[in-house]
Image (cartoon, rainbow, N blue to C red):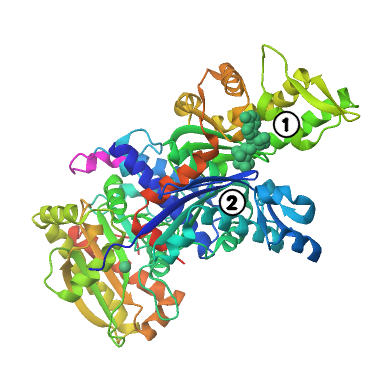
Amino acid sequence: MAHAKSLRRRVLREAFEENYQTMHGIAAPSVHRRRRMRRLSRATVTVAAVAAIFGATYVLASRQFSWTPELADAKTVLLVPPPAQRPGRAAEPAVTDASGGPMAREVLPFSVRRVVIDPGHGGMHRGTASALGLQEKAVTLDIAQRLAALLEASGFDAILTRSTDDALSLEARGELANAVEADIFLSIHINWFSEPTVRAVETFYLGPTQDKELQRLAARENLDSEMALGEFRHALERVYAGVRRSESRELAQVVQRELLKSLKTINPWVEDRGVKSAPFGVLISTQMPAILAEIGCLSNSEEAQLLDRADYRQYLAEALLEGVRSYALNLNPNLNLGS
Amino acid sequence: MTAQKEVLNVGVDLGTSRSAVSASNGARHLVLSYVGWPLDMVARRVVKRDVLIGDEALDQRLMLDLYRPLERGLIKEGSEREAQAVRELLKHVLSLAGVDEARESGAEVRAVVGVPAEAMRVNKQQLRGAMEGLVDSLMIVSEPFAVAYGLEALLHALIVDIGAGTTDLCVMNGRYPRDEDQKTLTVAGDSIDEQLIQLVRDRYPEANFSGHMATSWKESGGFVGELSGKVMVTAPVKGKPTKFDITEEMRTACGGLIPPVVEAMLDLISRVEPEYQPRVRGNVILTGGSSQLKGLGAALQDSLQEVGGGKVRVVKEPAFVGADGGLAIATDAPDSDWETLAG
Ligand SMILES: Nc1ncnc2c1ncn2[C@@H]1O[C@H](COP(=O)(O)OP(=O)(O)O)[C@@H](O)[C@H]1O
Ligand SMILES: [Zn+2]
């Protein structure tokens, strides 16, 4: 039975994850976990409430997705990430905040409200790493959390696919974005080039590529996928034909532009490799404009040193915020977004 | 492409009283969880071994510094010997399963080791350290999880594992169990033995018997609830074999298990979402050596009556259910996951 099989697979994953953490001395104190779970379940309820309030404004295809945290049936087992991997929210939603905090959701009648930020890799999947051991999964999580806080403060609704060092399949990330009816999906990664002098930033949307280097990059980023290769190809073919591609490309262009604009002042050595398409698994299942940004690289030691600095990561988060804001503004020029 | 590497999958249940191993080559072995080192040079010369395991260790116990690894579930901080005992025991059961030959022939050995839930709680890192390097990839899980996996009881199930030193309870909610899904009690086989010894000594002060005798009385005549007939045992009085009726002592000693186990069961069930509680109550799995006490399953099932009823199933072959579960985990897990635990 498919249900029992996916349940077994998922529980096993968690067992491996726990062992991996023990092996590498990553403590996972239960008190912390429990507190986090309580927080998450509250966030879950809020997400559902927000979705209900604004349900009418979403004219998206119907999505049968259940937010029940229990494992009620095969569908939820397959789609809802396990509790430890459920998404965290950057902050309490502004919708519940009447005390002059971030601006209320109601004044944002536009098409980009909810942003799902996906910190690349996590848990046993480290992603790339610098010569000194700085890991991609940690850098992406930190920047994602900073970006989420910035987005919330600017009136967006920010949701993280992971808020801890948990492994999460690429498919689960996409499913999550669909489940919360995200308006855009932004996956954050750090690159690694075989040429150690290269320092480059590039942003991707989903599509085919003939470039061998990009094929290798996609293969590396797709390691966390649970899809079989055949399934993967099939899914890709379906998406390449979709209208979502042009929106995703536009989002990628705006984000890349804003990233470079910001970076030029603080890190002028960084090379603009532009916007490209490549077959990234994490972008396949999303039903909204979705991009993957490689916002730095760990193969270059100067770059790695910068990425190790909190102020630089904050700077990157601000650059990404500008990207999201410009995209939202393009879609709705009358919009007055925060400061 | 290189040829597929040979893989030997192994499941191990490291119990406080017995340990079992079950491997993909068909090997299945059970050993007593005793590890002993010769006390001195004289003892060393008598036993002719650096370390003794299982029955041998028990037989020579007077010559040995004897350990029951993971007794009370933990490797005590700083106790090098305790960690060493865990390592020796594991090494021994692995060698019984043919791990040494497999490694020599170049096969990759992957082992899943189930340990008492308490041992996982106390010091995972040290536990892992003690087991390092014996196989190519090692995964440590709590024993009740291995049992649940092997019996495909991952969702809406309650595992009650009554062993020697501890009773482990674990509710399965479709995820890898967390601390809040589990409970460990120190009432189990050993505490029954202690109680039985006390009660029989009080009633028959003249009877001369050892703890091991009391354990075997329990294993053959232990019961909970009603019994048609009597529990009669033989023990020497002033060197003369004499028959004693210990029915009431046995009833009391074994019955002492019920209240704490029921309380823990109900507590864990009450933490489950109300709508799923009936399913969990209907799927209680009783395992561990002490689950074989006559009438225990029925008594626990009766106790669920007051909260709406349920069903308690007793595992047929409790000695191997954990090791078999470990083997199932090892076999099911994809290569890519195993690679993350290599080293
Ligand atoms: N037939 C039986 N009836 C009652 N108790 C038994 C029986 N067989 C074994 N036991 C008890 O089970 C306990 C050992 O169970 P086990 O699951 O092997 O423990 P552990 O996992 O802690 O090593 C011992 O206390 C032993 O006396
Ligand atoms: Zn990456």
The quarter holding residue B340 reads bottom left
Q: As displayed, is residue B269 above or below residue B224?
A: below
Question: Quadrant for ligand 2?
Answer: bottom left
Classify residue A66 as left or right of residue A40: left
Q: Report which residue position mark 2 lands on.
A: B120
Q: In the rendered image, is residue A50 in sight? A: no
Judge left or right: residue A225 versus residue A82: left
Is disc 2 in the same subunit as disc 1?
yes
Queried whether the magenta region covers residue A101, the answer comes back as no
Residue A172, position as x, y percentages in the image: 31, 51
What residue span does the magenta drawing correspond to?
A50-63
Say which chain tag 2 marks.
B
Residue B132 in sight from this viewpoint = yes
In which image quadrant can residue B79 be found? bottom right
Looking at the picture, tell me which residue is in the foreground, B68 or A328: B68
Residue B181 badge: none
Which of pointers 2 and 1 indicates the residue nearer the eye? 1
Q: Name the secondary structure under disc 2.
A: helix
Badge 2: few (under 14), some or many (20 or more) residues near its Cα, within 10 Å?
many
Determine the CA span between mark 2 and mark 1.
24 Å
Element type where label 1 sits in the image: helix
| Quarter holding residue B137 | bottom left
What amino acid is found at the position of numbered circle 1 in the picture? Ile
The N terminus of chain B is located in which quarter? bottom left
Depth order, front residue of A108/A318: A318
Disc 1: which residue = B192
Query: Residue A57 colored magenta?
Result: yes
Q: Residue at x 72, y 15 (%)?
A: B230
The amino acid pointed to by label 2 is Met
Return the residue found at the far top: B228
Queried on whether the Cβ of the residue with tag 1 lies below 8 angstroms from ligand 1, the answer reads yes
